[in-house]
């Protein structure tokens, strides 16, 4: 039982990133407070100024995401500068409320707009906004600016020390933790299959099974990113490890088909629960014994007549053992050297002015915060800035109107419950400084641990934290948290109104654009693979193009989530079908890539040419679905079917049983069918848009 819960914990937090991030944040905040409070007391400055240091520590720990570690260090050390500049602006304009408000709007616009210049400017803009915001909260004097800068510097240095010295994210460590997560994801898949077997008519359990498959793919993507940063291996070694990760992912996914087929078969009986139980026992075995244990389980299952499951068990066990062996190659690791910095993406052609997403979001956020200021002052002339921070934050990391609506609702719901918890916390520990500090740190940890899991839960803990914070400052009053609730609702409303009426980005439009990007990536994969097969007689380096396809799929899934998770079933079924088909397409293509690599060197030139022709025809058909092709969809599919028929004739002439060519043709057939299904589904969507 304990191991099952541990596996669920690992599966819920790939490579334990959320746990490590939350730990870094809370330790950085604690270290900042421990250093800054005595300094402020010695300096004769108000102790609440330490809050600026805590804010910088949090933003430095969470927001700095440059692609290169050296650039991450530079960005972290730059964090005190924009927050100090914003504090100075706030203090200089404080005597003139109207001017201060207008400057605040300029700071907000700039903080959002500067992200167009690269990943460094997102955290710098965010911390500038927070500096101006907290100046309204703390109302510091100009003479306190040096103390505020010192607190901000302490926060940045604390975050620097925790992230780059104490709890470093070395690629080797990420890979090792990710390997354990991958195994836990396989455990989760098997448990989900067992649940489906026990409740075959449950749609919810089948959706959970699909969600676990998606998380397995996300974990594999994360692992392959870590592999690319391993300087202790040459490129050939990295390719081998990427292939092993892909093998485990595909073996686990391929295991689902025979198991679910038995679940849905009338004669399935107890085969599935027995097979799942045996697999779970194997996965708890020491990696060195995996191969032998897997063989014994597979033989037992095969003797009971389940040949397909036995083959899948052997394949999965082999891949798991190979991955465990691969990670042992890092025992003698060389210290990782910094990689070259990635250049910021160039703007796409034609995107100028309000067409640029950064400009559009900056305008939206500025309008939302301006409305929040006006509405917030009606609720509380002294605490309207809580409405502003809500209107600002709900836009962060949202790309469409639907995402913002969901985020606004989650923030409001989390605040409602957090206000109740904050009142209870403050009533119990008010006046006990040690308990208040401990409670603040616990809320910080839990808030940011659950940040990637649920925005509502994060908001709950941050709001509960305020109860302890106000108690520590000696200003706690139940009406304060009540005011925060109303200001949050007002800020959320302002954000929603801005998202709906100011340069809106419809969720369906974003899903459609991401779907087109996925199809173009699929086209490039099919066409490039066909060309390589025809010209070189081999297929190599498929991992990169496959992962581009997987990245495109993840963008579609994320952008469609407001439509597939939060709408009525009758309104979300069409989008859900499209996302399911795209997921199936990516799954078939991953298997096709593995089969093609094995087939290329085992067939003659004529067969390779036919395989290339089929890949090209499918690429033309996919391109036709995007509206950019010279060849019509029907013509491309007719060509694909003719070439597929000739390949089937070649395969049937072989007398030595199933070969890699048979497997390749099988995955090509499935890819062809899913492309046709996608065309019908997306064609209906297109007709509805033009109607």
Image (tube, grey):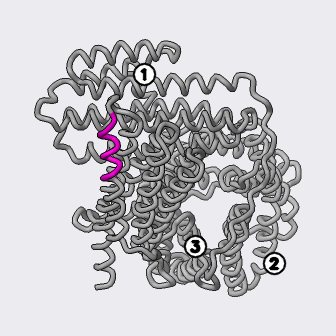
Is mark 2 in CB contact (under 8 Å) with mark 3? no
Residue 343 vs 666, above or below: the answer is below
Q: Is residue 125 magenta?
A: no
Looking at the rendered image, the disc whose residue lies closer to the viewer, 1 or 3, is 1
SS category of the residue bearing label 2 = helix
Name the residue that disc number 1 marks.
283
Q: Nearer the viewer, residue 346 or 533?
A: 533
Question: Circle 2: is it few (<14), some (14-19), or many (20+) Cα within 10 Å?
Answer: some
Q: Which residue is mark 2?
A: 92
Mark 3, residue position: 388
At numbered mark 3, what does the secondary structure look like: helix, strand or loop? helix
Helix, strand, or loop for circle 1?
Answer: helix
Q: Quadrant of residue 540?
A: top right
**C-alpha gap between disc 2 and disc 3:** 20 Å
Q: Is residue 87 visible?
A: yes
- Residue 642 x, y percent position in the rendering: 32, 59
Q: Which residues are magenta?
A: 645-654
The residues tagged by marks 1 and 3 sit, at their Cα atoms, a distance apart of 51 Å
User: At x 43% / y 45%, what residue is drawn?
Assistant: 592
**In the rendered view of the protein, which quadrant contains the N terminus?**
top left
**What residue is at 40 percent from the left and 30 percent from the top?**
187
Could you tell which of marks 2 and 3 lies nearer the N-terminus? Answer: 2
Compared with 446, 401 (above or below) is below
User: Measured along the vertical axis of the image, is residue 656 above or below residue 546?
Assistant: above
1 or 3: tag closer to the N-terminus? 1
């Amino acid at each position: 039982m304990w191991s099952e819960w541990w596996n669920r914990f690992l599966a819920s937090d790939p490579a334990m990133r959320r746990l490590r991030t939350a730990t870094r944040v809370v330790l950085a905040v604690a270290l900042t407070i421990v250093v800054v409070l005595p300094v402020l007391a010695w300096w004769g400055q108000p102790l609440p100024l330490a809050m600026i240091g805590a804010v910088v520590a949090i933003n430095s720990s969470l927001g700095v995401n440059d692609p290169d570690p050296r650039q991450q260090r530079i960005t972290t050390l730059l964090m005190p500068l924009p927050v100090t500049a914003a504090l100075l602006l706030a203090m200089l304009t404080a005597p003139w409320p109207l001017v201060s408000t207008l400057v605040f709007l300029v700071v907000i616009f700039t903080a959002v707009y500067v992200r167009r210049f690269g990943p460094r400017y997102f955290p710098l803009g965010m911390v500038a906004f927070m500096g101006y915001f907290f100046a309204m909260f703390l109302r510091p004097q100009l003479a306190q600016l040096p103390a505020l800068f010192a607190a901000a510097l302490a926060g940045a240095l604390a975050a620097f020390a925790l992230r780059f010295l104490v709890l470093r994210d070395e690629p080797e460590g990420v890979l090792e933790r990710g390997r354990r997560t991958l195994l836990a994801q396989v455990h989760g898949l098997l448990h989900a299959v067992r649940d489906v077997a026990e409740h075959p008519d449950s749609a919810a359990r089948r959706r959970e099974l699909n969600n676990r498959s998606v998380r397995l793919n996300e974990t594999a993507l994360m692992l392959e990113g870590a592999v690319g940063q391993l300087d202790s291996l040459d490129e050939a070694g990295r390719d081998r490890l990427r292939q092993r990760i892909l093998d485990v992912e595909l073996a686990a996914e391929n295991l689902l088909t025979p198991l679910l087929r038995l679940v849905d078969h009338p004669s399935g009986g107890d085969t599935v629960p027995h097979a799942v139980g045996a697999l779970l026992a194997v996965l708890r075995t020491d990696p060195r014994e995996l191969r032998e244990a897997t063989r014994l389980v597979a033989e037992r299952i095969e003797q009971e007549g389940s040949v397909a499951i036995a083959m899948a068990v052997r394949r999965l066990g082999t891949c798991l053992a190979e991955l465990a062996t691969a990670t042992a190659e890092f025992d003698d690791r060389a210290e990782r050297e910094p990689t070259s910095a990635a250049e910021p993406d160039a703007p796409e052609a034609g995107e100028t002015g309000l067409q640029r997403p950064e400009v559009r979001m900056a305008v939206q956020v500025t309008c939302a915060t301006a409305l929040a200021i006006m509405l917030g002052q009606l609720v509380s002339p002294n605490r309207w800035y809580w409405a502003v921070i809500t209107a600002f934050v709900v836009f962060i990391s949202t790309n469409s109107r639907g995402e913002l609506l969901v985020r606004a609702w989650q923030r409001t719901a989390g605040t409602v419950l957090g206000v109740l918890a904050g009142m209870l916390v403050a009533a119990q520990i008010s006046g006990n400084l040690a308990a208040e500090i401990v409670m603040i740190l616990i809320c910080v940890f839990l808030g940011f641990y659950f940040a990637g899991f649920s925005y509502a839960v994060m908001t709950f803990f941050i709001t509960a934290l305020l109860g302890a914070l106000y108690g520590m400052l000696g200003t706690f009053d139940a009406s304060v948290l009540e005011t925060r609730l109303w200001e949050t609702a007002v800020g959320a409303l302002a954000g929603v109104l801005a998202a709906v009426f100011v340069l809106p980005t419809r969720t369906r439009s974003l899903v459609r654009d991401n779907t087109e990007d996925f199809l173009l990536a699929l086209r490039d994969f099919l066409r490039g693979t066909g060309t390589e097969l025809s010209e070189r007689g081999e297929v190599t380096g498929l991992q990169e193009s496959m992962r581009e396809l997987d990245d495109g799929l993840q963008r579609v899934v994320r952008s469609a989530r407001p439509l597939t998770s939060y709408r009525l079933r009758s309104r979300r079924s069409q989008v859900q079908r499209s996302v399911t088909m795209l997921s199936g397409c990516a799954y078939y293509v991953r298997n096709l890539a593995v089969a093609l690599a094995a087939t290329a060197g085992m067939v003659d030139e004529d067969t390779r040419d036919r395989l290339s022709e089929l890949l090209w025809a499918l690429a033309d058909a996919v391109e036709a679905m995007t509206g950019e092709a010279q060849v019509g969809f029907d013509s491309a599919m007719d060509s694909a079917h003719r070439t597929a028929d000739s390949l089937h004739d070649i395969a049937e002439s072989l007398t030595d049983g199933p070969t890699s060519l048979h497997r390749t043709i099988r995955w090509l057939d499935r890819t062809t069918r899913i492309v046709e299904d996608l065309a019908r589904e997306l064609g209906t969507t297109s007709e509805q848009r033009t109607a």
